[in-house]
Image (cartoon, rainbow, N blue to C red):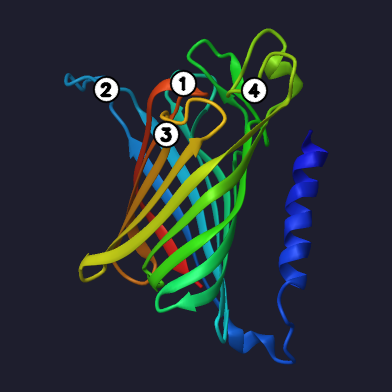
Amino acid sequence: MKKIAFSLVLLFAIISIHAQETPKDSTKFWTKKGNISLLFNQSAYNKQWLGGGTSNVAGNFGLNYDFNYKKGDVVWDNKFILGYGLSKIKGDEKTAKTDDRLELNSLWGKKAKGDWYYSIFFNLKTQMDSGFDKNEVRISHFFSPSYFQFGPGMWWKKSNNLSVNFSPATAKLILVDDHFTQFGPSFGVLQGDNSRFEFGASIQGYYKFNIMTNVSIENRLNLYSNYLENPQNIDVDYQMNVLLKINKYLSANVAVQAIYDDNSVQAVQVREVFGLGVNYGF
């Protein structure tokens, strides 16, 4: 299963590279920008503290990297996101995972008219480490589950900070390890299987703006409807990242993510991470 997943990613990368004309000096057509953050949270209480509380420490690592191509009427935007976090509560033997994301978004477009482009997009979402429920039962691990989406469409790009992509013919592939479906379905994959194919429509929106000096908000919204089964049940993935820049190296970050996917759980999943730490842009 892992070999199939990596092969799909590799195949996409090869096709994408060869689909572009390679100029003698290609660096002028590429814009690259990234951000690395290390966030820390810590609470400590002595024995005499009467207000209650448990000492704990937590840390989060984040990488957000954009590498975009533009030449003539062709644009190709790519975003790579990696996030990982752990927390340790005093008295607990094990650490708990607070964040774990591995995501690649790639959107190729050829200008049609005005701010509109003919487009093809690719998206990969997965995680790097094992996840456990409240009963310490493992419910996920590296690349299981992993979600792939691919499809043509139309892309409205007003600027690098505001765009919407519409894809009415999106193929979606969900991969899980065999042992997660040994005794029943998992993440929409039927018992005994390790993959699920869907075909539907997707909308991807991106909006970034500054609310004041050194305070920016990045919004990302992904909607998906499966034509083949319950198209009225729309999968929603909304992410908001707030960056409060203190100086060149210090920042406060707030990340909020809300997911609804009835194949996983028929409820809204919410994740929130806040921290103060080191921030480095490159």
Cα–Cα span, label 2 and label 4: 41 Å
Lateral position of residue 232 relative to residue 216, left or right: right
Could you tell me which residue is drawn at 73 percent across and 57 percent down?
A: 12
What percent of the width, then of the height, locates residue 181? 69, 16
Q: Amino acid at mark 1?
A: Val
Report whether residue 56 is seen.
yes
The picture places residue 72, in percent across and down from the top left corner, at 56, 87
Q: In front of the other: label 1 or label 2?
A: 1
- Sequence-wise, the earlier of marks 3 and 4 is 4
- Image location (x, y in percent) of residue 193: 74, 20
Q: Which residue is mark 4?
A: 189
The reply, left or right, for residue 180 in relation to residue 257 is right
Viewer-closest of 145 and 109: 109
Crowd around label 3: few <14 · some 14–19 · many ≥20 (10 Å): some
Distance Cα–Cα, label 3 vs label 1 = 13 Å
Circle number at residue 265: 1
Dot 3 amino acid type: Ile
Instruction: Please tell me whether mark 2 or mark 4 is closer to you in this view.
Output: 4
Camera-side mark, 3 or 2: 3
Q: Which residue is denoted by mark 3 in the rendering?
A: 234
* Separation of residues labelled 3 and 4 (CA atoms): 17 Å
| Residue 249 to residue 11: above or below | below
Q: Mark 3–mark 2 contact, CB under 8 Å?
A: no
281 or 225: nearer the viewer: 225
The structure residue drawn at horizontal position 32% and vertical position 23%, both measured from the top left corner, is: 54
